[in-house]
Image: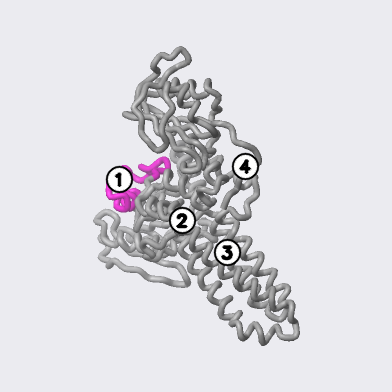
Amino acid sequence: MQRQPASLPDTIAAIATAPGRGGVGVVRVSGAGLGAFALALCGREPRPRSAHFTRFLDAEERAIDEGILLYFAAPASFTGEDVLELQGHGGPVVMQMLLERCLQLGARLAEPGEFTRRAFLNGKLDLAQAESVADLIEASTAAAARSAVRSLSGQFSEEVHRIGDALIDLRMLVEATLDFPEEEIDFLERARAMPRLASIRDALEGLLERARQGALLRSGLNVVLVGAPNVGKSSLLNQLAGDERAIVTDIAGTTRDAVRETVQIEGIPLHIIDTAGLRETADTVERIGIERTWREIGRADVILHLVAADAEDAADIDARLPAGVERVTVVNKIDLVGLAVGRSEKAGRVMLQVSARSGEGVDLVRRELLRIAGWHAHGEDVILARERHLTALREALRHVSEAGARLDALELFAEELRLAHEELGAITGEFSADDLLGVIFSRFCIGK
């Protein structure tokens, strides 16, 4: 779908490689009629889709650098415009000199995400594919990277379009029926309108579930370890991380500040935060650490409340933990009192019995975190979704469900279908406000 900008775009340029020194650096240029631009920069007009070894020249025709020039003529390029990629030596001074020469030749510095935004506006990518470019760059796990590549190739968009096409078919049927009100019920029954609607609802529910899993791949869960001093929080962090990340001693109050470690379980990033033990103290430094513990608790997705199997009841700490946050009680040091590894549940509260020092039962903690995350082994079907995608899918599902209750008023039935279709269109960019596009692309890297 062509989303042509209101006027002919100007030429933009940016360094596309990461800051710092590297073996190779790339300056990217996009605009109209870049053959003459390349002639002034290199003394030659390049052939499209060919690599040219050349010297990059300054205004006095002195060599700035030598490297490879790639030229992609519109519309067969990433942005749909003429694109030059200048590959030189990756020193920051050289790259800056090459960029300055491009600006002298009439380009302006690209805004964050502007290359990808032009690709979207010129119909080279839809909005979901454009967002997957940033997701691929920012992927923190291999699973997230694979999911982003699938979205970039159009898998997510194809599924959204498939549901949208089914909605269009049903909307056409309903609109035709509105012209013959005396036959509408029989006509809809013969056309199997309700089974079609049920099929659309099932498809939306399945897509939403896979998108929820993908959202976990993007952001993960914040898991905060809390409890009294010396109950084994740091030992559990080290077991989950597979390394000695936190200092472990028998001295209560060793941990004075939050210790953060990101681990992966089934590809899901879990941000584990070890905190200062909760107790009354006159130590100024420890008291500051405890205040920070409560701040981390306020940001938690999951709280693992550790209690020592050989210690007194920790109900006072438990009572102070915030309601509405998933909480698991982890009874640690079971090896000291002869308890067995296990999982129990009472009144909706899960209790795990483990030994963080030996590692016994730590797999129970991992599996419990996956259960809380709602993780299912979807394999290659997971969609790396953003919050706006989840919101649109939820709203589309709500409108489809509302349509099912409006069969006695076909005008309202048809309106709910239209609203559901519009929500799906917002995912791929068929219905997108300019301010939304500005927010999305402003979060990209410069040069993408």
Give the residue at mark 4.
5
Closer to us: mark 4 or mark 2?
A: 4
Instruction: Give the residues drawn in magenta, as a range.
Output: 234-260
Comparing 252 with 37, the one in front is 37
What's the CA distance linking mark 1 and mark 4? 60 Å
Give the residue at mark 2.
154
Q: Is 118 on the left-hand or right-hand side of 62? A: right
Dominant secondary structure, magenta: loop
Closer to us: mark 3 or mark 4?
A: 4
Residue 89, compared with residue 16, is above or below; it is above
| Residue drawn at (72%, 73%) of the image | 412
| Residue drawn at (42%, 36%) of the image | 48
**How many C-alpha atoms fall within 10 Å of the one at disc 4: few (<14), some, or many (≥20)?**
few
Residue 32, compared with residue 395, is above or below; it is above
Task: Return the x and y of residue 439 as percentages of the image width and height.
Answer: 59, 44
Give the residue at mark 3.
394
What's the CA distance linking mark 3 and mark 4? 31 Å
Closer to us: mark 1 or mark 4?
A: 4
N-terminal of the pair, mark 3 or mark 4, is 4
